[in-house]
Image: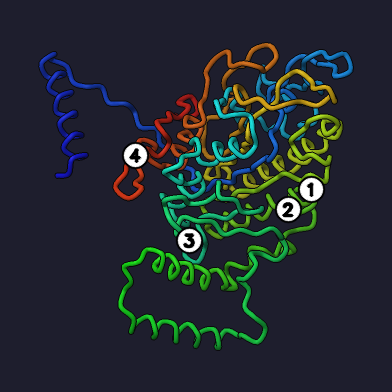
Amino acid sequence: MNRRDFLTATASATVLSRFAHAGVAPAASPFLKGKAEHVISIWLGGGMSQIDTFDPKRRGDPAKKLAGAYYDSIPTAVSGVSVCEHLHRLAPLMDRVTAVRTVNHDVIDEHAAATNRMHTGRLVSGTVVYPSIGSVVAHERRAAADGAPAYVLIGYPNVTRGPGFLGARAGFLYLTDTGQGPAGLSRPEGIDAGRQARREALLASVRGQTPASADSRQRDYDAAIDQSLKLSSPEFTRAFRLEEEKADLRASYGGEFGQRCLLARRLVERGVRFIEVSHNLNFINGNGWDVHNGGIKQQHGLIADLDIAMAALITDLEARRMLDRTLIVVTSEFGRPPEFDSGGGRGHQGRAFTCVLAGGGLRHCGAYGETDELSKKVARDPVSVPDFFATIHAAMGIDYTKNLYDGDRPVPITDGGKPIAALFG
């Protein structure tokens, strides 16, 4: 027994003996466990304004410096829950959705640090490179089918999305062009199936004559080769043929971001466990979701883009009986304050903002938690980033109380987060 195990066992024995002397048994905390099999995570790079989307308040006026929402609100399928007027396709579907309105963190309101927090659930550390939530899900659940990767990133790669100390096996496959699939996986011209099979047989023969390496980097490299061979197969690459879908369905998803969401659904069907779809399309308003100054004037274009694609994704998954086993997650670095800056836009706000959950077999309620009259502070039911991550893990049937290990150092999987119990049962 090592020192850590000895201390754990001693502490447990002490607690149990105290309960025994008191004549009572310790109460077991119920372990929340959902039935979702996949995650489609939508990342709104720049900072979605909660007061202008899923947590609307009174109407403001940037010209008069009157704090408040930029748009009017509309009712939804859930009584008492309203959303921005530009989310009119999602409004009738909000009974399949929960806008978690009280997510909060204390990270400096700066994009890089907050992006790291919203992907790893941790502050940046000088001693530990923490894995992203996508990598943790990939590590815990693996791919749902042989020949598929566990984790795909549709967008540009970044260390905050990476596997950290979990290693390359929990890393992502990324692509930026939905029409071509990942660069480097397609076979070169002239390499037919027969020639490819001979190459793989030669590789297997060489490996069979080579002693197993003790170097983890070599093992990661070999694992990457094996994965790339599987992913270059026609079975997996067919997922990228969006033209196979009916024209009206493709049109219902909207533009480039919508096509990314459609591809995500096809990747779920191929067995991918976790897909992040990036939506920071700066060309819509010049700023993406980072609506300082004049960028807010075209913010409705981003909101409408999200509305079209997410509504189509929900209804498409539901029609295919996949919604209950596919958890849709919408996150951003932080939210926006109700006040307008000197240019009419908004600054950054991490103390209260909205992240969204849909499908995944959860007991949805339209909205969870409550902010004050201007969505500036949490008024009821705060949800920390570890709590939000624990909710995702619980929905996926992952033990949110366990430790991962960086060498022999235990690292709590969600930094002590607790799931939102109201969404289960």
Q: Quadrant of residue 240?
A: bottom right
State the image coordinates of residue 112 (x, y, percent, origin top left): 62, 40
Mark 4 and mark 3 residues within 8 Å of each other at the beta carbon: no
Q: Which tag, 2 or 4, sits closer to the chain's start?
A: 2
For residue 229, side relative to residue 6 (left or right): right
Q: Residue at x 78, y 15 (%)?
A: 67
State the image coordinates of residue 76 (x, y, percent, origin top left): 71, 25
Q: Secondary structure at mark 2?
A: helix
Q: Which tag, 3 or 2, sits closer to the chain's start?
A: 3
Q: Which tag, 4 or 1, sits closer to the chain's start?
A: 1
Q: Give me the C-alpha separation between circle 3 and circle 1.
A: 29 Å
- Work out whether residue 18 can be spotted: yes
Mark 2 and mark 1 residues within 8 Å of each other at the beta carbon: yes
Q: Quadrant of residue 24?
A: top left
Q: Give me the C-alpha separation between circle 2 and circle 1.
A: 7 Å
Q: Give me the C-alpha separation between circle 4 and circle 3.
A: 25 Å
Q: Nearer the viewer, residue 416 or 328?
A: 416
Question: Which residue is tagged 4?
Answer: 402
Q: List the single residue furthest toward the left.
A: 21
The crowd level at tag 2 (other Cα within 10 Å; few <14, some 14-19, many 20+) is: some
Question: Which residue is tagged 3?
Answer: 145
Q: Nearer the viewer, residue 87 or 388?
A: 388
Question: Which residue is tagged 1?
Answer: 254
Q: Give me the C-alpha separation between circle 4 and circle 1.
A: 40 Å
Q: Quadrant of residue 267?
A: bottom right
Q: Which of the two discs, 2 and 4, sits closer to the camera?
A: 4
Q: Which tag, 3 or 1, sits closer to the chain's start?
A: 3
Q: Which tag, 2 or 1, sits closer to the chain's start?
A: 1
State the image coordinates of residue 145 (x, y, percent, origin top left): 48, 61
